[in-house]
């Protein structure tokens, strides 16, 4: 594993011969509030202790020289004055997209070298892409004195992904990557971008991630379809109330009264989003009252909505959630992130974590005969420049 910051630093110096700064940039989990961010709704993510470590230094040439320590196709180079096009390798696009956005906004970025590695499983729904964007932005802001705020970086990262990579994601992942704090979850209002930190520090409860190992290309195309379906819902509902700008402005009663005017699928998508927003607010109250059981129950409800109304789950994710339904040591379980694969997130009594993992594994393998992987996530801080050497 190349994650140790000193390894990344050493590799960088061997490869490029200069002294870099080092940035740590975390993955994220989302406790509840799925597919709500691009509907101006509420989310409850947190940065975790899986991360990308990046070493960066200016090279005083007009080149961007990139090296990904863990990838098969590991190096990429481009002139910073070129009109960037997609790399065909995948990972450089997140970096090029970010530099492109910085240039569009008039920030002066010179040539730089970057080497990175990490332990975020790719395509598992833990936002390795937002970690790369946030890490590069944190690094470049420091190297070239750009003075970017965390919010500006989150917005630039999201735009890079929307416009350069072509995934119409919301802002949750980039926001969580940059605003995380140890022991806290972030309740973000994706309309106003105001946020509050909620304590999530119960020593007896752990966050267990179960990875289906399913990685589907479908995820990004279906993601964009869901976005369009929500927009279609807004377009129809607007005819009854022109002040509606997003599903955030729609109340349950209003939706139910107009149910017959909406195609069934569009109604289901809208209904899920309204339910899920309410669940985030209720779940935050549960946290304040330290009522983790009710919180966990909302996670299950979120999963069933994602499965039945929003239709972004898959058999593997459903089997993992089903496996926990009869386990008293699991408080809540649901699919996490965009869907169609990746991980479930589970709240589990810490002292039972091994037996829970074993029981989930047995159920999964009996049903599907497929490999599974587990990660324990600890809530940590957002992307930051490390004091090293
Ligand atoms: C992906 C996107 C996020 C969010 C989630 C679903 O992770 O990047 O913006 O929409 O899916 O909640």
Image (spheres, grey):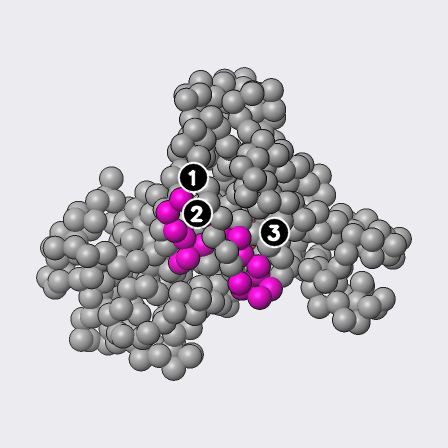
- Judged left or right of residue 288, residue 144 is left
**Residue 41 percent coordinates (x, y):** 62, 57
Q: Nearer the viewer, residue 293 or 214?
A: 293
* Residue 195 counted in the magenta span: no
Sequence-wise, the earlier of marks 3 and 2 is 3
SS of the residue under disc 3: loop
Q: Is mark 2 within 8 Å of ligand 1?
A: no
Q: Residues within 10 Å of mark 2 (few under 14, many from 20)?
A: some
* Residue 233 appears in view: yes
Q: Residue at left 44%, top 35%?
A: 202
Q: Which residue is mark 1?
A: 201
Task: State which region is magenta.
Answer: 176-194
**Residue 69 percent coordinates (x, y):** 25, 49
- Judged left or right of residue 118, residue 31 is right
Sequence-wise, the earlier of marks 1 and 3 is 3
Q: Is mark 3 within 8 Å of ligand 1?
A: yes
Q: Residue at left 63%, top 38%?
A: 298
Q: Residue at left 31%, top 70%?
A: 141
Q: Is residue 84 above or below residue 317?
A: below
Figure quadrant of residue 258: bottom right
Q: Nearer the viewer, residue 79 or 167?
A: 167
> Which numbered marker is on residue 184?
2
**Residue 99 percent coordinates (x, y):** 36, 70
Q: Which residue is mark 3?
A: 35
Q: Are marks 2 and 1 in contact (CB under 8 Å)?
A: yes
Sequence-wise, the earlier of marks 2 and 1 is 2
Eye-nearest disc, 1 or 3: 1
SS of the residue under disc 2: strand
Q: Residues within 10 Å of mark 1 (few under 14, many from 20)?
A: some
* Real-space Cα separation, disc 2 to disc 1, in angstroms: 7 Å
**Residue 82 percent coordinates (x, y):** 34, 77
Of the 4 image quadrants, the one containing the N terminus is top left
């Amino acid at each position: 594993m190349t994650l140790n910051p000193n390894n990344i630093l050493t590799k960088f110096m061997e490869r490029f011969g200069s002294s870099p700064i080092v940035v740590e940039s975390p993955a994220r989990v989302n406790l509840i509030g799925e597919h709500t961010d691009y509907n101006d709704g509420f989310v409850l993510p947190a940065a975790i202790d899986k991360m990308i470590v990046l070493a960066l230094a200016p090279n005083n040439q007009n080149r961007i020289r990139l090296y990904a320590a863990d990838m098969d196709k590991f190096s990429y180079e481009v002139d910073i004055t070129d009109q960037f096009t997609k790399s065909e390798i995948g990972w450089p696009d997140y970096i090029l997209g970010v530099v492109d956005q910085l240039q569009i906004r008039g920030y002066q970025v010179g040539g730089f070298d970057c080497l990175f590695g990490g332990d975020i499983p790719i395509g598992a729904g833990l936002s390795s892409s937002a970690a790369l964007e946030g890490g590069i932005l944190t690094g470049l802001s420091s190297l070239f004195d750009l003075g970017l705020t965390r919010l500006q970086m989150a917005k630039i990262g999201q735009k890079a992904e929307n416009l350069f990579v072509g995934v119409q994601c919301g802002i949750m992942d980039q926001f969580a990557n940059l605003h995380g704090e140890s022991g806290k979850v972030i309740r973000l209002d994706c309309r106003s971008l105001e946020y509050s930190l909620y304590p999530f520090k119960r020593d007896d409860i752990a966050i267990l991630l179960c990875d289906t190992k399913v990685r589907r290309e479908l995820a990004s195309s279906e993601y964009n379809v869901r976005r369009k379906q929500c927009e279609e819902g807004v377009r129809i509902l607007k005819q009854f109330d022109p002040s509606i700008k997003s599903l955030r402005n729609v109340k349950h009663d209003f939706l139910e009264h107009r149910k017959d005017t909406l195609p069934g699928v569009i109604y289901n998508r809208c209904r899920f989003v309204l339910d899920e927003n309410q669940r985030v607010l209720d779940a935050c109250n549960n946290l304040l009252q330290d009522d983790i059981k009710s919180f966990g129950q909302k996670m299950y409800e979120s999963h069933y909505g994602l499965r039945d109304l929003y239709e972004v789950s898959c058999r593997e994710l459903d089997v993992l959630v089903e496996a926990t339904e009869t386990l008293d040591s699991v408080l809540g379980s649901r699919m996490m992130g965009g869907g169609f694969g990746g991980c479930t997130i589970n709240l589990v009594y810490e002292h039972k974590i091994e037996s829970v993992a074993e029981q989930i594994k047995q159920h999964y393998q009996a049903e599907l005969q497929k490999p599974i992987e587990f990660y324990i996530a600890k809530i940590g801080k957002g992307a930051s420049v490390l004091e090293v050497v």
